[in-house]
Amino acid sequence: MSQPVLSVEQLEDLLSAPTPEVVEVLKALEGDVLVLGVAGKMGPSLARMVRRASQAAGVERRVIGVSRFPSVETRAALEARGVETIRCDLTHEDAVALLPEAPNVVFMAGMKFGSTGQEARTWAMNTYAPAVVCRRYPESRIVAFSTGNVYGLSPVAAGGSKETDAPQPLGEYAQSCLGRERIFEHFSRTQGTRVAVIRLNYACELRYGVLVDLARAVSRGEPVDLGMGHLNAIWQGDANAMALRAFAHVASPPFVVNVTGPEQLSVRETCLELGRQMGKTPRFTGSEAKDALLSNAGLARRLFGEPRVGAPQLLSWIAGWVEAGGASLDKPTHFAVRDGRF
């Protein structure tokens, strides 16, 4: 994987490439796979990975993507790659009741950006929709995406929050995400639904992600705020692969795992490295706080191994992509936010 990524087609092929372990999990998994919230930043590549892994395993199954599909292009691209699509708002119980049966469900729906000022809708999407889904699919295996934001800020010196740490969510977005987890836990305990909760922090590809935000700032000569001075990041393809492998660990009560890269990256040092690769001198403002939003991925590494793409490779790809004027989703992560207001 050391060669540069030169096109969106090549990028999407890399993002959706299943590992041998994902192929084995999908081979052992019985039944169709329903991906809820498929039209988000990660959903299309995850759905394609399910499709490709199933084909590699020789398993015939429906892969069904559900979303409100604000983008016609996203829906058409999924259909072209063998993923069935259904338009549905997951907060509408009558509509969810009409969704097809599926013994395997990936829950990726949620709301983060724009949550400030739309708190009620944020809570509806992040806590009410999971309840609707749990009632609809009580017997299914569910892999539910969550976020490391549920932990709140932790001391940089501590090495990141662990799954056993008590959540301390800061702001209504993070609180609603903990609410989402509690809803899945409630239904898992009361109706026996087997669930795996993926606390993700932060997934990156070349068109989106915290490292892309930093690279674009360095490239443009914009100052980088060092207040949130450290971060975790993981190649989106590896995050998808680990999430799908979590189907082998669903449980009641839910199995919870942090999914992120093994490195605790310094924002300053990351920008200096990006600048070196792009021939630019980074500009900084502020200074590093002693705490940050950090997760310890030790459990994921023991279960799933090391990511295929480490930080050095990812930074090299991103630097080349940004300097070449590669496509961008134009969706800033706002990773530097320290008050929980997104």
Image (cartoon, rainbow, N blue to C red):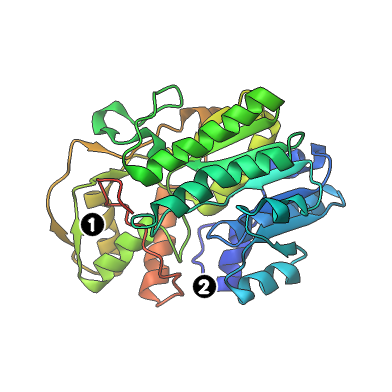
Q: Position of residue 27 (x, y in %)?
A: 81, 41
Q: Position of residue 250 (x, y in %)?
A: 67, 30
Seen from the viewer's position, the closer of residues 161 and 313 is: 161
Q: Amino acid at mark 1?
A: Leu
- What is the C-alpha distance between the residues marked 1 and 2? 23 Å
Q: Are marks 1 and 2 in contact (CB under 8 Å)?
A: no
Q: Where does the C terminus fall, quadrant-wise?
A: bottom left
On residue 6, the disc is: 2
Question: Which residue lies at the image location 44% right of the left edge and 75% below the top edge?
Answer: 326
According to the picture, the residue beneath numbered tag 1 turns out to be 272
Regarding residue 242, the answer to whether it shows in the image is no
Seen from the viewer's position, the closer of residues 176 and 63 is: 176
State the image quarter where residue 9 is shown.
bottom right
Question: Which residue lies at the image location 44% right of the left edge and 42% below the top edge?
Answer: 176
Q: For this view, does 284 lie left or right of residue 201?
A: left
- What SS does tag 1 mark? helix
Question: Which residue lies at the image location 40% right of the left edge and 39% below the top edge?
Answer: 175
Question: Which residue lies at the image location 58% right of the left edge and 50% below the top edge?
Answer: 108
Regarding residue 176, the answer to whether it shows in the image is yes
Q: Residues within 10 Å of mark 1 (few under 14, many from 20)?
A: some
- What SS does tag 2 mark? loop
Q: Position of residue 36 (x, y in %)?
A: 65, 52
Seen from the viewer's position, the closer of residues 228 and 221 is: 228
* Looking at the image, residue 254 lies above or below residue 288: above
Q: Amino acid at mark 2?
A: Leu
Q: Where does the N terminus fall, quadrant-wise?
A: bottom right
| Residue sitting at the far left | 286
Q: Position of residue 106 (x, y in %)?
A: 66, 46
* Looking at the image, residue 10 lies above or below residue 16: below
